[in-house]
Image (spheres, rainbow, N blue to C red):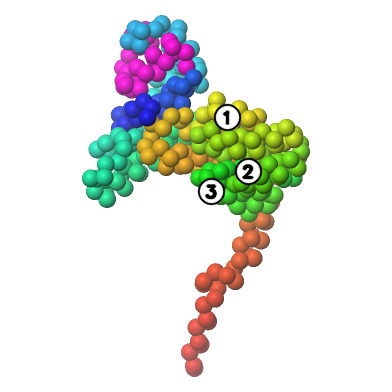
Amino acid sequence: MGASAPSLSGTSLGVMARVRAAMPHLSKSMLRIAQFLTTNPQAVLDLPVDELAVAAQTSAATVTRFCQLLGYSGYRALRISAAADAGRSTLVEPWTREAGQMFDPRDSPADIVRNLLAARLSVLQAAVDLLDVAAVERVAKAARLSRHIDIYGVGGSGMAAVSLQRSLYRIGLNAHAWTEVHLGLASAALLDRQCLAVALSNSGKTRETAEMVSLARKRGALSVALTSDPLSLVAQAAEVHIQTSPSDDYLQPGELAAQAGQLFAIHALYMLAARDDPGRAERALSLTAAAVVDHRPDSRRPARPQAEG
């Protein structure tokens, strides 16, 4: 279990998502800042930079570098983002427990549903904050130009791979999903510079997925990894990395949370791929819809008899 989860109410969820994603890879001085913020999320709104530095046992210059590492221009920009997140969080019903807390078997069914929703809201906001839209757009454009798209995933990520493949295929893209390493490696061996390879792995630790996308990269395909950890095995095997959720499992149940972030990322990729060539997407969707119209229940209903005059 990683650091404790941020509450949905009264805290800067977007900023905290970035803080938690960066924690495994920070220097000791910056890690002290991150740890202080995870236990005192309101501090970024209450303290000026010099007081925050003292509280975190570091310097104001280190705090500024820490903010820049998270993608902000400085401490002021981070505070503005935190204030926006805090304002947004007031629109969400305050929950009786933190989203990351483990579910208690003594909870009522209604409480379990509420807490599951809280966890999903948290991870989806984190996914939005972490998503590199420019990278997703690059991959979407590459998908449009590719003669062949390989999508790799094993286990739960295999189901996401199949979902992405079906979505891309329906808008006219030559996409194929591989959830077994032998078939995936065979397909990767046939790729070239006109191809795209996408690897899905929540943890980024799946060796088989790393092998498939690594071979695709060696063959010249644009290789992309969607994982929670930019320094993971799968992420390092690919040319482009898209982070789908924070790299620790502070949102529980961890697997459910990670899946929500992963699905958000692949849906974003699908939407941008359709947007990149809307004409082709609309034609393909129309053709596929027409092909199955006779198999829809409504189309097989017998016509109502005409009333006699």
Instruction: Assign a secondary structure to mark 1.
Output: helix
Q: Could you tell me the amino acid type at mark 2?
A: Val
**Mark nearer the N terminus (3 vs 2):** 3
Image mark for residue 159: 3
Q: Quadrant of residue 239?
A: top right
Q: What is the C-alpha distance between the residues marked 1 and 3?
A: 20 Å
Q: Residue furthest front?
A: 182
Q: In front: 288, or 154?
A: 154
Q: Disc 1 marks which residue?
A: 233
Q: What residue lies at 35% left-to-right and 22% top-to-bottom?
A: 38
Q: Could you tell me the amino acid type at mark 1?
A: Leu
Q: Disc 2 marks which residue?
A: 181
Q: Magenta region: which residues? A: 26-53
* x, y percent for residue 251: 38, 35
Question: Can you see residue 1?
Answer: yes
**Mark nearer the N terminus (1 vs 3):** 3
